[in-house]
Image (tube, helix red, strand yellow):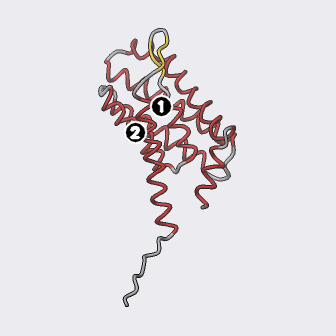
């Protein structure tokens, strides 16, 4: 009688699978939130920054870059390809910066607030410069500036509420330990 030996899955392998799965879920959410906007007078507000900031507060900088940069790139490629490379760079840099700043040292809500505000500045400045380049007009970029600021602030406030008030950080930490 032959015994079948099952390979034992190590915690490191489980964490890799979880890392990939959670990153993919957030990236899919980013793509979905990039597909439609809230119509406001003169433009649209997109909720992708809410997903990018939330993922950045929960994930490491590489995963945050994948969610923010590659997720936004794919969302734009599917729905509106003109600014897709701007989205890759700007949202990728925004996400990686937030994640790095939020996770350096002891994590706290005040550190997360500063990190997301820095990320908001990166997004607003990056998109303003990017739109100037893509559309070849500074005036068009300035017209869209208030919407960029509003979108960034929705991301900051919403992600902090989800992570700290709704308890996503506690849930995420429990998931990491199990």
Q: Give the camera-side residue of 125 and 79.
A: 79
Mark number displayed over residue 71: 2
Pointer 1 with pointer 2, Cβ within 8 A: yes
Q: Give the camera-side residue of 28 and 102.
A: 28
Q: Where is residue 155 in the image (x, y as percent from the top left)?
A: 56, 30
Residue under numbered circle 1: 48
Q: Which residue lies furthest to the top in this view?
A: 41
User: In the rendered view, would you say 103 is above or below 42?
Assistant: below
Could you tell whether 170 is left or right of 141 in the image? right
Secondary structure under badge 1? helix
Q: Residue at x 47, y 71 (%)?
A: 9
Secondary structure under badge 2? helix
User: In the rendered view, would you say 36 is above or below 106?
Assistant: above
Q: Which residue is drawn at 47% across and 27% down?
A: 125
Q: Position of residue 139 (x, y in %)?
A: 40, 12
Q: Residue at x 63, y 49 (%)?
A: 171
User: Would you call the spot at circle 1 few (<14 residues within 10 Å), some (14-19), or many (20 or more)?
Assistant: many
């Amino acid at each position: 009688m032959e015994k079948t030996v099952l390979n034992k899955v190590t915690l490191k392998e489980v964490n890799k699978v979880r890392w990939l799965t959670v990153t993919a879920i957030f990236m899919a959410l980013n793509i979905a939130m990039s597909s439609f906007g809230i119509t406001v007078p003169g433009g649209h507000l997109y909720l992708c920054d809410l997903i990018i900031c939330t993922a950045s507060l929960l994930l490491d900088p590489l995963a945050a870059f994948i969610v923010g940069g590659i997720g936004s790139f794919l969302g734009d490629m599917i729905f509106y390809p003109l600014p897709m490379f701007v989205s890759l760079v700007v949202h990728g840099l925004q996400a990686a910066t937030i994640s790095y700043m939020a996770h350096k040292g002891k994590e706290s809500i005040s550190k997360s607030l500063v990190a997301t505000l820095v990320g908001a500045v990166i997004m607003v400045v990056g998109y303003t410069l990017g739109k100037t380049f893509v559309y070849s007009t500074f005036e068009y970029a300035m017209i869209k500036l208030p919407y960029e600021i509003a979108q960034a602030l929705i991301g900051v406030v919403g992600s902090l509420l989800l992570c700290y008030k709704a308890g996503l950080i506690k849930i995420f930490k429990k998931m990491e330990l199990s």
